[in-house]
Amino acid sequence: MQNNIIIINGPNLNLLGEREKNKYGTHSLKEIENKCADFCKKNSLNLTFYQSNIEGEIVEKIQNSRSDIHGLIINAGGYTHTSVAIHDALKVLNIPIIELHITNIYNREEFRHKSLISKVATAVICGLGTDGYIMSLEALKKLIKNENWKKLNQGIGWLLKRV
């Protein structure tokens, strides 16, 4: 049985390769999608790759992932810091979730230091450029195989409460 993975990308990520190349690199979102698709094909994973600039569409995509998705990666872009709706939608899922950022959000403007997604994510990958997408897929593949991922998630929640 192949596991179903979804990667959800938020606002402005459709402009990767064009905007702030010094921060986000030169790869387009389509190039990243192709690399992810190649990885998934080689690792017997079914991939859905999605991007929207609209918060409600992202929430609906998350909600629609409840029954047939085994793992989720989300790069929510600017919604990371503002969207209670995305946080609440992710909270309903009973699958491993990886929060992904191309840049190190803790090494940027102060308002980017707070993530509303981290407390519901199993893991966070940030600051590794667009390579973070493949790293996230590799980690998600391992988390899906690991039946104890829920315990990992509880441990992360405990840690985040103390940070």
Image: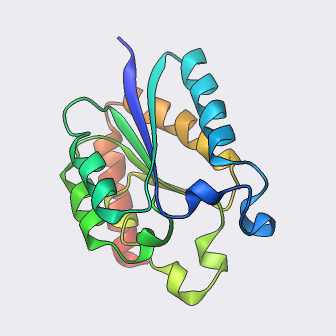
Number of residue marks: 0
> Does residue 68 lie above or below 91 as drawn?
above
Q: Residue at x 74, y 69 (%)?
A: 20
| Horizontal side, residue 79 vs residue 131: left or right | left
Instruction: Tell which of 15 and 90 is nearer to you.
Output: 15
Q: Position of residue 127 (x, y in %)?
A: 67, 62
Residue ranking furthest to the top: 1
Q: Nearer the viewer, residue 108 or 47?
A: 47
Rendered residue at 27%/56% (across/down): 59
- Residue 90, relative to residue 84: is it above or below? above
Residue drawn where x is 66% and y is 65% of the image? 103
Q: Which residue: 41% across, 38% down?
A: 6
Residue 100 vertical position relative to residue 31 in the rendered view, above or below: below
- Quadrant, the C terminus: bottom left
- Quarter of the picture holding the N terminus: top left
Q: Which sits in the foreground, 25 or 57? A: 57
The picture quadrant where one finds residue 161 is bottom left
Q: Position of residue 130 (x, y in %)?
A: 68, 50
Residue 71 picture quarter: top left
Q: In the orientation shown, which residue stands out farthest toward the bottom?
A: 110
Q: How is the image coloured?
A: rainbow
Report the side of 162 relative to 75 (left or right): left
Q: State the image coordinates of residue 108 (x, y, percent, origin top left).
A: 65, 80
For this rendering, which residue is in front, 52 or 96?
52
